[in-house]
Image: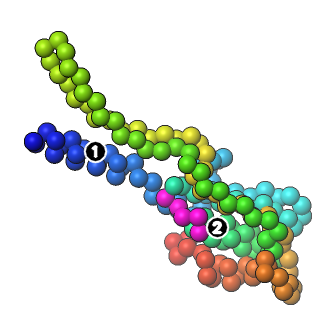
Amino acid sequence: MMFKQLTALAALSLLAACATAPSAYGPSAGPGDPGFSQTQIENTRFRVTYTGTSGDSMQRVQDFALVRAAELTLERGHEWFIVTNRHATKSRAGGTGLSIGAGFGGGGSGFGLGANRSFSGRAETEASLEIVLGSGSIPNNGNAHDARAVLLNLRPASI
């Protein structure tokens, strides 16, 4: 009976260790890694992408993409941005598994317990925005965002 309890405890510990926490806001270390990246398309047109982990909700990832768009807008000396295109995906790349095995023979027996974590290098959750930067009067457009207001309302307190 004690063996079964230890096995169950080990299995729960392994699964807890493999749980993915939400990503911290910041730049991506490389393709598929959590964080933001941007590509300049034209003088005032950019593609901003935020890649999250399986621990991030789609809303969190979309909010972080907007935060980066607002930061980029202000860094470039502008006041507002318009989202001209947006795309969000949630994939099931990678995963966690648990294996249990038993073997008998040759006058002995054995039992094994293992865990695995698959890392495919692809994002689990990603939001991408194409934005155009602007200054002056903000257009009366549902896709136009005041950069300072976005930061005030969506920027994580930890940054």
- Rate crowding at label 1 as few (under 14), some (14 to 19) or many (20 or more) other CA atoms within 10 Å: some
Main structural element of the magenta stretch: helix, strand or loop? loop
Determine which quarter of the picture holds residue 64.
Answer: bottom right
Q: Percent position (x, y) of residue 24?
A: 53, 62
Residue type at the position of mark 1: Ala
Q: Residue at x 56, y 45 (%)?
A: 93
Residue range in magenta is 55-59
Determine which quarter of the picture holds residue 107.
Answer: top left
Farthest-out residue, top: 106
Q: So how many labels did they put on this image?
A: 2
Of the image marks 2 and 1, the number of the one nearer the N terminus: 1
Q: CA distance from mark 2 to mark 1?
A: 34 Å
Q: Quadrant of the N terminus?
A: top left
Q: Residue at x 72, y 61 (%)?
A: 87
Q: Is residue 154 visible?
A: yes
- Rate crowding at label 2 as few (under 14), some (14 to 19) or many (20 or more) other CA atoms within 10 Å: many
Q: Does residue 11 belong to the magenta stretch?
A: no
Q: Percent position (x, y) of residue 152?
A: 63, 82
Q: Does residue 58 belong to the magenta stretch?
A: yes
Q: Is residue 77 visible?
A: no
Q: Percent position (x, y) of residue 30?
A: 64, 47
- SS state under label 1: helix
* Residue behind mark 2: 62
The label on residue 156 is none
The label on residue 11 is 1
Q: Residue at x 44, y 41 (%)?
A: 117
Determine which quarter of the picture holds residue 138.
Answer: bottom right
Farthest-out residue, right: 43
- SS state under label 2: helix
Q: Percent position (x, y) of residue 112?
A: 26, 31
Q: Quadrant of the C terminus?
A: bottom right
